[in-house]
Image: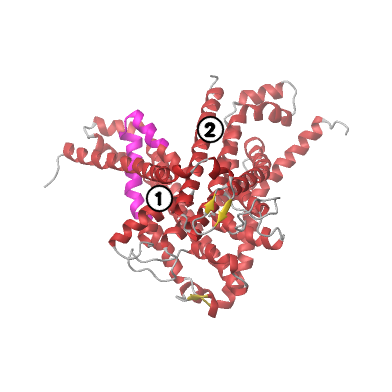
Amino acid sequence: MKLSPKATQRLAWGIIWAAGIVAMLSLLVIVGYILMRGLGEVDPEFLLTPPRGGLSGEGGISTAIVSTAYIIVLTIAIATPLGLGAAIYLAEYAADSWLTSIIRYGIETLAGVPSIIFGLFGFALFVTVLHFNFSILSGALTLACLVLPVFIRTSEEALKAVPRSYREAGLALGATRWQTIAQVVIPAALPGIITATILCIGRAVGETACLYVTMGSSAAMPTSFLSSGRTLSLHLFYLAMETRALDKAMATAVVLIAIILAINWATNWLSQRFRARMTGG
Amino acid sequence: MPKMSRYFMDALSRRGVFLAALAAILIVFLIGLFVIQRGLPALVEIGVLDFLFGTVWRPGINEFGIFPMVIGSLYVTLGALVLSAPLGIACAIFLAEVAPYRIRGVVRGAIELLVGIPSVVYGLVGMVVVVPLIREIGGNGFSVLAAVVVLTVMVLPTVVSISEDSLRAVPVSYKQGALALGATQWQTIWHVALPAAKSGITAALILGMGRAIGETMAMIMVIGNSIIIPVSPLDPARTLTGNIAVEIMYAAGTHESALFATGIVLFVMIMAINSLAFVARRRK
């Protein structure tokens, strides 16, 4: 039996709608389940006390929050100057040459390298050769390499979105190219550059594999960049896999999802503003 | 400090940003250098073929064969591809052609959020939701199937967003032509839009595979990590990524080197997958 074109279309529409609904549902199941089981555990005490270990993973996540903050600050401090420099080079200076295509190819490759390979690299170079040991510094250096391509791509796009006329106006006033970039182009592209930074913070919060093999697993309060530590994601992993304290892991997941939601909201808001500004709104 | 001439600043910063751009290549180079330099001794000592096709991995007695992990990685990656391809493409058609404006915004927002959710959270939900469900079917739940289900959701955003972009890139005139000939909307999608977007959709699937094969923590959490060659989807297994992460902290000597060599194998597999994507995009 052959279906009429109309009937086929109805069938296809059914399947396509089902696919859209499945995508929605998977998000709802993930977020809903975690909120259901974890939200009750999240209170000021959970956020502000250190984990005490034990079989049910008693205590809170204060040290993990502090370690996460350390990692974010250090990773951003390393990755953004380097990434912004590279983005400026690619957007403003790079000629269409073989060297530029090698640099672009390098960035593409870096974006495709999986987290655990960055981890192996960080373990070999930072942990063992440079003797930073398992520390926040080793973790942040590794993570900075991982987020670099994300930052370069996003901020290069932001720089390229700045209209040519801005640069022409700067140069016509007698400014040097650098003065034009630093005082005209970068301020105009700033919301986009901040978006890139926030995206990197998101990656830093969510990344685990490369930190798992470079940061160690200490649950104590970090005292310096050379302390070992665990980020929230790592702490969740240890809670789920070693202590098997699933409810505490769920509560940690609630905090992680709240951070991701905030990051998502902030990037959307910023990029809307950026678009409005670039189209003269 | 005397004020530097602005021309000097101009020249200085031009070189500065150039060096920053070079850093990206330097990092790629260093990653390759360190992983290969650390992994090579094991490959030489064990022999490439024995390493790749050896079925016994027991560091205690100096047996290092990664074949079970190669199969484990391929198994979960292909499984995720088989599930996420129809789901992802249908979802992309939904977003590009079918969904009403408001619903499109909501679904796209959901997919954006799925990208941001950390992989350990996927692993956790896999452990407490997917694994017990699979235990009902048979086995102890920690299995290839659990890994495939979790990975499918994880790679879905990649497949959907790139496929949607390439469907949107199909010129409107193609679709208008088909509709003007009396084709239904679905005939237009099936016979005109999808073939025109084929190379982009292929690239989306391949990139999704690249993401799947590199996933580590979520896999460790749901796949069981046993070093066996999985036969049924209900069997536990171990991936190449999991092998590295689980053992690197306490490895030394040949064992450590063999884990770096596992990294080399993983890297080669990913480069092969990525160059497939490159070729698929080129064919446009």
- In this view, B63 is above or below B218: below
Residue B31 placement (x, y as % from top left):
62, 58
The answer to whether A178 is drawn above or below residue A129 in the figure is: above
How far across and down, in percent of the image, does residue B195 sit?
33, 44
Residue at far left of view: A1
Q: Quadrant of residue B260?
A: bottom right
Image spot of residue A20 (x, y percent)? 32, 40
Q: Could you tell me the amino acid type at mark 1?
A: Leu
Q: Pointer 2: what residue? A: A266
Q: Chain of mark 2?
A: A
Q: Nearer the viewer, residue A255 or A138?
A: A255
Query: Is A200 left, or right, of B9 in this rendering?
Result: left
Between the C-alphas of marks 1 and 2, the distance is 29 Å
Asked which secondary structure carries label 1, the reply is helix
Residue B168 image offset from top left, x and y in percent: 39, 35
Q: What type is the residue that disc 2 sits on?
A: Ala
A189 displayed left or right of B162: right
- A26 horizontally vs B59: left or right: left
Mark 2: which secondary structure? helix
Q: Which residues are magenta?
A: B80-109
Side (left or right) of B210 relative to B170: right
Residue shown at the point (46%, 63%) measured from the top left: B239
Q: Residue at x 35, y 64 (%)?
A: B140
Q: Residue at x 62, y 41 (%)?
A: A96
